[in-house]
Amino acid sequence: MFKKVLIANRGEVAVRILRACRVLGIETVAVHSLVDENLMHVKFADESVCIGPNSATESYLNVSAILSAAELTGADAIHPGVGFLSENEKFARLVAESGLKFIGPSPEHLAMMGDKITAKKTVADIGIPVITGSDGVVIDVADARSIADSVGYPVLLKAAAGGGGTGMKVATSPAELEEAFKLARTEAKASFNNDSIYIEKYLTNPRHIEIQIIADSYGNVVHLGERDCSIQRNHQKLIEETPSFAVSPEARRSIGEVVVNAVRKLEYVGVGTLEFLYENGEFFFMEMNTRLQVEHCISEVVTGVDIVKEQIKIAAGEALSFSQDGIEIRGHAMEFRINAEHPETFMPSPGKIEDLHFPGGNGIRVDSHVYRNYVVPPYYDSMIAKVIIHAETRNECLMKAKCALDELVVDGISTTADLHRKLVRNRDIINGNYSVHWLEDNLRSL
Ligand code: MV4
């Protein structure tokens, strides 16, 4: 096992990783930007190093500063957390070349899944269902036209380097194709400096269902069921739940088996998530996240698996201590993301937290890095807490969520808590009747 892990991240996930290290008896190194000197995990870590000024580019994305901090403190592994450098192939490579362990998959797997066209081709070849579309990059408007004609409208143009909706354009008819193609290209070029575009049949009303997997370096692969992450705004997830209201036990078993077999064939090692669109009982692969995810906690509470602890053990070369037969999905879990945001505009609402109270009780977990008088800086992700609810049934989970959200106090800044209080009382949410478009379609009438 590692002796000392450097946590190359901040906020809530840095605390989550620090806790997993503590449970494993591993020493921790926190690295932070100037303004983050007072972060919770910096106070708790055994050592801390300031790696640069406030801008993420100069701190949490500053590869040489992070590697220097690791060398200085004698860390033997780096946990990249979520976002920042967590899916960066070059960083993973440099960490390995520095003689340290990158707590995540191989650079080859990061590269494979980082390119969405390669990812789609790779998984299609090993039995994962994908959405019909172009075989690879669409070279020009004429090419786009012939593919769209054979796939049938509506079609969706996506950026190969994308993910998260950037560079995505719908064409509902041939008349819209040229414009959509050019816009997608320009946006992709501007955002990723890569204007490769591919085409898919556009699914009009899908759910976002993702499967959590965990794989060790001995070929053991286990899935921890699915998460329904359809409640999103601007491709920012707000509520996640497991199991999904829409997925039957039979569909779960079947997609779980397909995913596990594919991941084994890929020789993927680490934790990961395969994202699917789910419509009319069918799964279609979108992309694979080759890292820990924010919403991993709901899978933890229904399976009893400490995903971050297992992730670290796997990176240290240990075998999984459980098999698929040992995984039972118990009860229902939901996660509510509390972001420092204006309730209407969803613009960041940084500032000082004047008063703070977190809910508690049986089946209530709050993962957070904030405390009373903490000042939320304007430079980073706006999430300040996750309220995770676990109950025997979905109905009980919603009742408990109501109770927990009413107990939550965050004064001094605006948060998404008020929106959640409305959502847990909404008919469609209570009935599990929603798709990826539900929140944006219903925001105004909430
Ligand atoms: C789609 C789709 C419909 N059809 N692909 C959005 C983010 C990016 N990762 C993929 N996305 C979508 N891809 C096809 N062929 C609809 C979406 C989509 C979406 C997906 C998941 C969660 C929220 C979404 C909101 C709008 C569109």
Image (spheres, grey):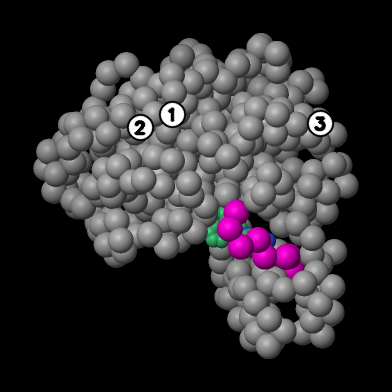
Depth check: give the residue in front, 42 or 321: 321
The 10 Å Cα crowd at callout 2, few under 14, some 14 to 19, many 20 or more, is many
Mark 2 → mark 1, Cα distance in angstroms: 6 Å
Horizontal placement of 150 versus 171: left or right?
right
- Which quadrant is the N terminus positioned in? top right
Q: Which residue is mark 3?
A: 261
Q: Which residue is mark 2?
A: 398
Q: Which residue is mark 1?
A: 394
Q: Quadrant of ligand 1?
A: bottom right
Mark 3 residue type: Asn
Answer yes or no: is residue 323 visible. Answer: yes
**Relative to 128, is 317 above or below?**
above
Which range is magenta? 197-206
Query: What percent of the width, then of the height, locates residue 362?
Result: 32, 16
Asked if ligand 1 lies within 8 A of label 2, the reply is no
**Residue at 14% in and 44% down:** 411
